[in-house]
Amino acid sequence: MKEKKEKKEKSLIDENGNSIPVKFLDALVVERHKLVEEIIDKVLKEEERLKAFKQQCFKKIEAYLAKTAGRYGESWQGNASLYNFSKTKQVAFKIHKVLTFDERLNVAKRKIDEYLKSKTENADDDLKMLVLKAFDVDKKGNVDFKQIFSLKQYKINNPLWQEAMSIIDDAVSVVGSKEYMTFSVRPNPKNDWDSVILNFSALKVDL
């Protein structure tokens, strides 16, 4: 049986789409090209394998949770942490709701501004700074939902403030959800959990 010979490329395509004969290229450039091609080809195959495995995991977990809730005539909602019998392995299933505010958030901010102006003389400067900071936006122009919702912790009975809090509730809506799954193991139930890392870049290896 004849051994399969490695295919030797006669030319390579550069970034401008030009075909360059290999004989005119430095040997290290050609070697680098082959190295990158080999690694990326394997990486793409691993990516597809992981995608298939992830989809399989979600389907199995969702089927189990639906079966559990269905026993009581309900449908599953929310997060779940599943353990093996010895409590040494854990699969955590989490659902993160994607929220958004509509244009009414600006109306709520104006109500809060009115409240702060009415309290100028006796206003708590620290509270005023925290309230205004809650409406700061990031580089993409998005507000921090936690900061906005943190305003509801203040026990302020002023009608303007109360109206603003009510408008904030009306302005928020769920536009989608993202599902996550994490894995943890430990040698015995008395030990701390160790996360199973599937993020290639975060994996620790001996070099």
Image: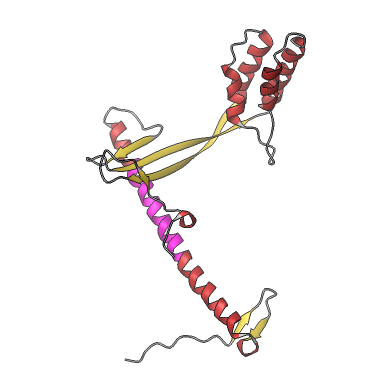
| Identity of the residue drawn at 73% across and 14% down | 116
Q: Say which of 53 and 69 sits in front.
A: 53
Q: Say which of 21 and 197 sits in front.
A: 197
From the viewer's perspective, is 118 left or right of 76? right
- Figure quadrant of the C terminus: bottom left
Q: Which secondary structure type mostly characterizes the magenta part of the structure?
A: helix
Q: Say which of 63 and 155 sits in front.
A: 155
- Figure quadrant of the N terminus: bottom left
Q: Position of residue 136 (x, y in %)?
A: 69, 31
| Color style of the picture | secondary structure
Q: Furthest-left residue in view?
A: 85
**Above or below, comparing residue 44 to residue 95 in the picture:** below
Q: Does the magenta run of residues contain 119?
A: no
Quadrant of the rendered image containing residue 184: top left
From the viewer's perspective, is 193 left or right of 173? left
Q: Position of residue 195 (x, y in %)?
A: 38, 46
Q: Does the magenta run of residues contain 51?
A: yes
**Above or below, comparing residue 4 to residue 180 in the picture:** below
Q: Position of residue 75 (x, y in %)?
A: 36, 31
| Number of numbered callouts drawn | 0
| Identity of the residue drawn at 59% across and 30% down | 145
Quadrant of the rendered image containing residue 85: top left
Quadrant of the rendered image containing residue 123: top right
Magenta residues, as a range? 44-62
**Above or below, comparing residue 128 to residue 98 in the picture:** above
From the viewer's perspective, is 75 left or right of 200? left
Q: Position of residue 140 (x, y in %)?
A: 68, 41
Q: Furthest-front residue in view?
A: 207
| Identity of the residue drawn at 76% across and 10% down | 118
